Image: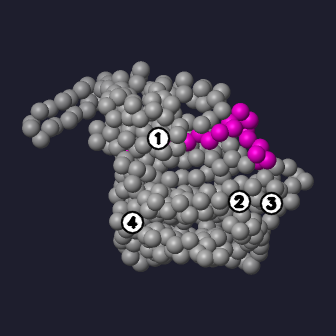
Amino acid sequence: MAKIVVQNPVVDMDGDEMTRIIWQLIKDKLIFPYLDLKLDYYDLGIEHRDATNDQVTIDAAEATKKHGVAVKCATITPDEARVKEFNLKKMWKSPNGTIRNILGGVIFREPIICKNVPRLVPGWTQPIVVGRHAFGDQYRATDFLFPGKGKLSIKFVGDDGKVIEHDVFDAPGSGVAMAMYNLDDSIRDFAHASFAYGLARGYPVYLSTKNTILKAYDGRFKDIFQEIFDAEYAAKFKEKGLTYEHRLIDDMVASALKWSGGYIWACKNYDGDVQSDIVAQGFGSLGLMTSVLVTPDGKTLEAEAAHGTVTRHYRQHQRGESTSTNSIASIFAWTRGLAHRAKLDGNAELDKFAHTLEKVCVDTVEAGYMTKDLALLVGDKQSWLTTEGFLDKISENLTKAMA
């Protein structure tokens, strides 16, 4: 069978530990046998990031802007123990954070649904896509302890000399305080990315905030989303039979538990962090979760697995023991990236391949072939395959599907 020609490159960001091994196996067994594909390769393994003073992460993000598509393997974000283990120069920042700051945009996380994998929320029969605004709020806040009685205030000094100052609290004793912020431009990007992704997926969009309490802060999110929707997206949504609505986050959480899924849930930074983990667990497994970073114009996409580097399995692998590591989220990082490459290039064959590989993964699990993590969820009588055995089964089924 002739390979499918992919006209433009895809940025390949390699990673760490067990997922790095799986990443190579995916390329060898599922990608290169079918695609004539040029990869712009960057080694984001912790040792190479250290050797380049993390310049390789910046270069990979800039290459993503250039080519429009990247696929990323899971990487280590070092703590004190990792600094010691790898004898690192410093505690390098999260590569995901660095890439997000350069590309901007919104992270959309979505479960991969296999009918035979039990869900903690049985009513969730369609995907819930959580869009996380990855800028500002708690993650860039200034927080501190104050030692005793005193006055807490906050001040903004404009470049024009205008001063805005608020008395926050007359503290009767010691305590804690925090100041956080966001930007109108970033919120606008968040809105555009959310609405564009809703249109692309054919899903309604919901924004959740706590604007009844944070009237100015969360109210700003609500107002900007509504303004952009009315001006640029209302007609397009109506044409596709889609809707947009703002809801209080407590109402949205309650509704999410009752609804079957099939929508985009736009969340502020911290909310998105929490809700994407709840959704992953509610659908059964973090190993069955896709994650894509999409820019506001919808033109640039970086796809990754939504889990870590599976250190425990890597230690087993180092000892020469067999492992049973779930590779589905890493495979879907490739398929989501390739589907976007197909969309940008107008490559129908590539688009069909990406969707076929996704279907093969789900069909394989539903036929009873899976890794140990999923087998434990299914039940004690469910058999399981090794890391390589599962990928070999996917490869065998993909060959049949492509024929």
The extreme left residue here reads 160
N-term mark: 1 or 2: 1
Left or right, 119 with reference to 150: right
- Picture disc at residue 199: 1
Mark 4 surroundings within 10 Å by alpha-carbon count, few (fewer than 14), some (14 through 19), many (20 or more): some
Q: Amino acid at mark 4?
A: His
SS for callout 1? helix
| Residue drawn at point x = 68 percent, y = 36 percent | 124
- Quadrant of the image for the C terminus? bottom right
Q: Amino acid at mark 3?
A: Tyr
Residue stretch in magenta: 115-136
SS for callout 3? loop
Q: Amino acid at mark 1?
A: Leu
State the residue position of label 2.
360
Q: CA distance from mark 2 to mark 3?
A: 11 Å
N-term mark: 3 or 4: 4
Q: Amino acid at mark 2?
A: Val
